[in-house]
Amino acid sequence: MTSAISSSLAAVRQRLAAAEAAAGRAAGSVCLLAVSKTFPADAIQEAYDAGQRAFGENYVQELQAKSAELAGLDIEWHFIGPLQSNKTRPVAELAHWVHSVERLKIAERLSAQRPESLPPLNVCLQVNVSGEESKSGCAPHEALALARAVAALPRLRLRGLMCIPEPTADQARLAQQFALLHGLRDEMAAQGMVLDTLSMGMSSDLELAVREDSTLVRVGTAIFGSRTYPA
Ligand SMILES: *Cc1c(COP(=O)(O)O)cnc(C)c1O
């Protein structure tokens, strides 16, 4: 019997494959991160049973609870939410990736707190591509200096850049904001920094993100359904 989650996961995988093909990208070149925030461990287990391995969480407490509950599974945990400096330790200990590094102090703490028994923590810098006051992320003009500083930390591995564009249905504006992140990545590459990850695209705009060279889309609603409490 197929669960609701396994069929929505299959539908998202099809969308992703179609987006890769439409953008002239290789099949499988974009990773799918299943954003499980607000959903229980059972929902993650269902997606896992359908072959999904990478899951994204926004809240430290949820990461702690679900990673403990699902400790027997080989899940790759991605922390994608805002991170306060007094909450870095559990993230450094439990996550495989952090997408939301926006200032050096947080990166330094994650590096210092990453257990020696684990490989370096994969990180992306979150960039505020929309310029909205309320948005997390470093300013685009700060990204290069921050990337250099983060890349020098011993227990982190800088993998790339992440953005959350403005909540708008205006495709041209969204494309512009994705392109800004893509351009920053290219600028860093020109300076010799090898970044293999552009974390951009969500349930409603993954096709557009894939066209702008996304390598990882973060999809919640389209897999798990709508969330019952706001993020
Ligand atoms: C919640 C969230 C997502 C998933 O958004 P959906 O629209 O539900 O796909 C992706 N990225 C981040 C950072 C989020 O907080």
Image (cartoon, grey):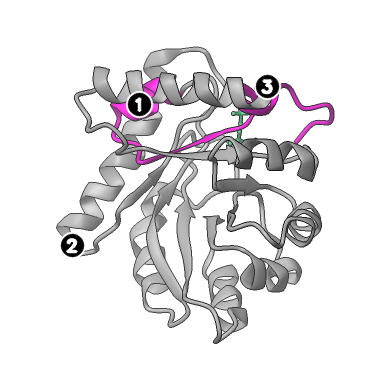
Distance of label 1 from label 2 (alpha carbons): 23 Å
Q: Nearer the viewer, mark 3 or mark 2?
A: 3
Distance of label 1 from label 3 (alpha carbons): 42 Å
Give the residue drawn at x 29%, y 26%. Answer: 20
Residue denoted by label 2: 191
Q: Is residue 216 above or below residue 115?
A: above
Q: Position of residue 88 (x, y in %)?
A: 68, 69
Q: Residues within 10 Å of mark 3 (few under 14, many from 20)?
A: few
Q: Position of residue 76 (x, y in %)?
A: 55, 56
Q: Residues within 10 Å of mark 2 (few under 14, many from 20)?
A: few
Q: Is residue 96 above or below residue 229?
A: below
> In the structure shown, which secondary structural element does the residue marked by tag 3 occupy?
loop
Q: Could you say which is closer to the camera, residue 187 or residue 61? A: 61
Q: Is residue 91 left or right of residue 158?
A: right
Q: Name the amino acid, label 1.
A: Gln
Q: Name the amino acid, label 2.
A: Gln
Label ID, residue 176: 1
Is label 1's Cβ within 8 Å of ligand 1?
no
Please report the bounds of the magenta region as a residue range: 206-231
Residue denoted by label 3: 1
Q: Residues within 10 Å of mark 1 (few under 14, many from 20)?
A: some
Answer whether residue 67 is magenta in the image: no
Q: Is residue 145 left or right of residue 112?
A: left
Cβ–Cβ below 8 Å for labels 3 and 2?
no
